[in-house]
Amino acid sequence: MEKPKAVLFDAYGTLFDVYSVGLLAEQLFPGHGAALSVLWRDKQIEYTRLVTTSNHGAHYKPFWELTRAGLRYACRKLGVELTPAHEERLMNQYRHLSAFPENREVLQALKDKRVVTGILSNGDPEMLGIAVRSAGLEELLDHVLSVDTVRKYKTHPDAYQLGPDATGLAPSQILFVSCNGWDALAATWFGYRTLWVNRYQLPFEELGTEPTRTGSTLRDVLSFF
Amino acid sequence: MEKPKAVLFDAYGTLFDVYSVGLLAEQLFPGHGAALSVLWRDKQIEYTRLVTTSNHGAHYKPFWELTRAGLRYACRKLGVELTPAHEERLMNQYRHLSAFPENREVLQALKDKRVVTGILSNGDPEMLGIAVRSAGLEELLDHVLSVDTVRKYKTHPDAYQLGPDATGLAPSQILFVSCNGWDALAATWFGYRTLWVNRYQLPFEELGTEPTRTGSTLRDVLSFF
């Protein structure tokens, strides 16, 4: 099979570690850090789905706002008090999530092979810009695509369509990479070739479709070339 | 404000106790029953959203199949072995979930007041039929509406539109009742008057919209009349 002509990466969970907020959360709310970071993430993603599906997207809000809403919900559910100062510290931490260590070498290897690279993310442009600059990845990415342009979150097809539109390639010529099983699944449904990077040894979604390949780190992207 | 002319109830979680499978789950997988019943439910709902949002609903499957897929995922995630016999027992239990004890008296009181009553559920018609008959509610419900007709799950507006279509009433003339916060939220966005029955003392969704009223049991429906 022909090699992909472009690689698009999911950002949150794939290039940037959404659970890296757990350490600060544990300092602020001892005994609740891990639970908070999981619940926060789950709620943030749930909210992207609710605003996309309900009322034809009329209740869309940028990812930054849904991230804040998810944090507030998670703290209330866990029964911990989120002061305004705590909220700002945690949100600021979210703006500067840790990048996974292999990002740079994988992106550099793709550039060396003259493969088009990019991000296709739920994040809004400002969040993505800060995260990409903090990780020093600007020079290695040809495209930074935010669903904010179409005001529909993944897994809506309008969100995935940003990839073909930006690159001028067919979905089958693009490798889409995500550590989120639901994202790898829906990208496969959309028509991309897909790599699910299963960082956390999770089962894949049980909906009868498998990603093109499964790996354990971003380095597995290079197996396509 | 004018009294509602009809009351539509969500089924799973509202009339029927989705966590009542936890007891059997605990017998089959000691120490994992509660976690399994929560994870199963969460995954089932997540799958309704994935198939509704992705590829314009091309991957729709009936609720029964998504329920089974959610069970399989939950067991794999928890690392417990789901034999075919276990799966059939748990699925059969799901078909016969416990009904909440106040259902009958509330529905009877609404009938006595000549209010139109119904269910508007993600469940497919066969599941709903069995659940309604098992609970002896057939005579008390004017409508049993399944999203299977439109092949889109709540919170898609096509699903909520089933209510006005079946009753001939405007959304604002209908009271929609759900114990699921996301359902009460999206029904409010759709235009229904809403009662969120907060059975589990949870926070409401943090998306800037509140249900018309919040209660703690289905009896609070009667406060609208």
Image (spheres, coloured by chain):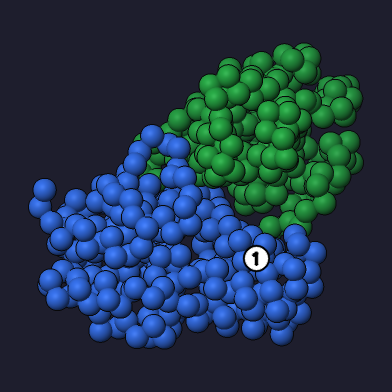
Chain colours: A green, B blue
Residue drawn 34% across the image and 41% down it: B210
In the image shown, does A77 or B125 lie closer to the viewer?
A77
Residue drawn 60% across the image and 78% down it: B91
Residue A202 horizontal/vertical position (percent): 78, 53
Number of on-image labels: 1
Q: Amino acid at mark 1?
A: Ala
Residue B177 horizontal/vertical position (percent): 32, 59
In the image shown, does B155 or A168 lie closer to the viewer?
B155
In the image shown, does A207 or B8 lie closer to the viewer?
B8
Residue at the limit of the structure toward the left, as seen here:
B2
Residue A211 horizontal/vertical position (percent): 74, 52
Residue drawn 51% across the image and 44% down it: A49
Quadrant showing the C terminus of chain A: top right
Q: Is residue B60 left or right of residue B26?
A: left
In the image shown, does A80 or A9 lie closer to the viewer?
A80
Query: Is A187 situated above or below B79?
Result: above
Query: Is B158 situated above or below A197?
Result: below
Q: Is residue B22 left or right of residue B16?
A: right
Circle 1: element type: helix
Q: Residues within 10 Å of mark 1 (few under 14, many from 20)?
A: some
- Circle 1 sits on which residue? B34
Residue B1 horizontal/vertical position (percent): 11, 48
Residue drawn 51% across the image and 62% down it: B60
